[in-house]
Image: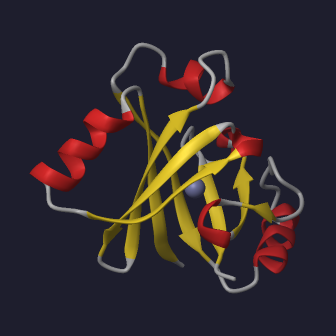
Amino acid sequence: MKIDHIAIVVKDLDQALDLYTKTLGFRIVYRETIADQSVEAVGLEAGDSIIELLRPLAEDSPIAKFRGDAATKLHHTAYRVDDLQGELQKLKDRGVRLIDEAPRKGAHGNLIAFLHPESTGGVLIELCQKR
Ligand code: ZN
């Protein structure tokens, strides 16, 4: 598995983008709203991987509550797989608790599924399959 993206939830997206593009020199690959996760996502190119900045669309959403008062907070790491449904079944068979039993649509046209942090040492892990 390769790192597909690292997602960071931010309070002020414009300020975060200034840092990541103007100061750090990353290039924007995509910017879109993911309605079912209630976020605006901006993908920044980092070699073969993406740094994804997430801005909650509502301050009472779970992701905004996760960020709390922090300006930015690491939200999840996402690993790229070729067969998402097959990987989910394998992990389930190994006793891993899944948030998503079946793949769903993520940012940038990817299929994604989250594993439960309870099964992954507290870190939210996403598996991601390119379309
Ligand atoms: Zn993600």
Q: Nearer the viewer, residue 125 or 36?
A: 36
Q: Quadrant of residue 15?
A: top left
Q: How is the image coloured?
A: secondary structure
Circle count: 0
**44 lies left or right of 99:** left
Q: Give the residue at x 57% y 38%.
A: 122
Q: Nearer the viewer, residue 88 or 58?
A: 58
- Examine the rendered structure and indicate whether residue 1 appears above or below residue 92: below
Looking at the rendering, the quadrant in which ligand 1 lies is bottom right
Whole-percent x, y for residue 10 in the image: 41, 33
Q: Quadrant of residue 25?
A: bottom left
**35 lies left or right of 64:** right
Q: Nearer the viewer, residue 67 or 120?
A: 67
Whole-percent x, y for residue 131 in the image: 69, 83
- Examine the rendered structure and indicate whether residue 96 appears above or below residue 66: below
Whole-percent x, y for residue 50 in the image: 40, 66
Farthest bottom residue in view: 82
**45 lies left or right of 55:** left
Q: Give the residue at x 85% y 62%.
A: 92
- Examine the rendered structure and indicate whether residue 12 appears above or below residue 89: above
Q: Give the residue at x 67% y 23%.
A: 61
Whole-percent x, y for residue 6 in the image: 44, 56
Q: Quadrant of residue 82?
A: bottom right
Q: Give the residue at x 54% y 43%.
A: 123
Farthest left residue in view: 23
**Which quadrant is home to the N terminus?**
bottom right
